[in-house]
């Protein structure tokens, strides 16, 4: 996949736990964990909006495009 989720890095920078952030954005710990570990296949815009609001960041801080290597 070409899109990398950087939620884990932003959470460390902001010093916020998974449980605290999940509570603030009204998402289950398990669903937030899927985003944090980069295993998500999609993210709702409303969730991205809530993450940016609570973390004080931009969508580009959470998502990164990395082209697939051609073999």
Image (cartoon, rainbow, N blue to C red):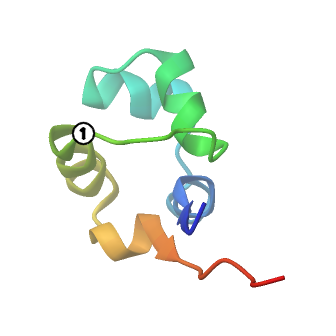
* Callout count: 1
Element under disc 1: loop
Residue at the image position 30 percent from the left and 48 percent from the top: 51
Q: Which residue of the protein is positioned furthest toward the right in this rendering?
A: 71
Residue furthest to the front in view is: 71
Q: Position of residue 64 (x, y in %)?
A: 49, 74
The x and y percentages for residue 52 are 26, 57
Task: Pick whichever, 60 or 70, lies toward us.
Answer: 70
The image quarter containing residue 2 is: bottom right
On screen, residue 14 above or below 38: below
Which residue is labeled 1 in the image?
44
Q: Considering depth in this image, is 71 or 59 the residue closer to the camera?
A: 71
| Residue at the image point whose x is 52% and y is 45% from the top | 16
Say whether residue 51 is left or right of residue 3: left
User: What is the quadrant of the N terminus in the image?
Assistant: bottom right
User: On the image, which quarter does residue 13 sit in?
Assistant: bottom right
Of residue 29 and residue 21, the one placed in the foreground of this image is 29
Where's residue 43, x and y in %? Answer: 34, 42
Indicate left or right for 55 with 33 as reference: left
Residue at point 52%, 24% (across, down) = 19
Would you identify the image quadrant in which residue 68 lies? bottom right
| Quadrant of the snapshot with the C terminus | bottom right
> Residue 65's x, y, as percent?
50, 77
Q: Residues within 10 Å of mark 1 (few under 14, many from 20)?
A: few
């Amino acid at each position: 996949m070409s899109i990398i989720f950087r939620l884990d890095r932003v959470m460390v920078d902001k010093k916020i736990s998974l449980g605290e952030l999940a509570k603030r954005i009204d998402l289950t710990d398990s669903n937030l964990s899927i985003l944090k570990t980069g295993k998500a296949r999609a993210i709702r815009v409303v969730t991205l909006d809530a993450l940016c609001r609570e973390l004080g960041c931009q969508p580009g801080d959470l998502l990164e495009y990395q082209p697939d290597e051609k073999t």
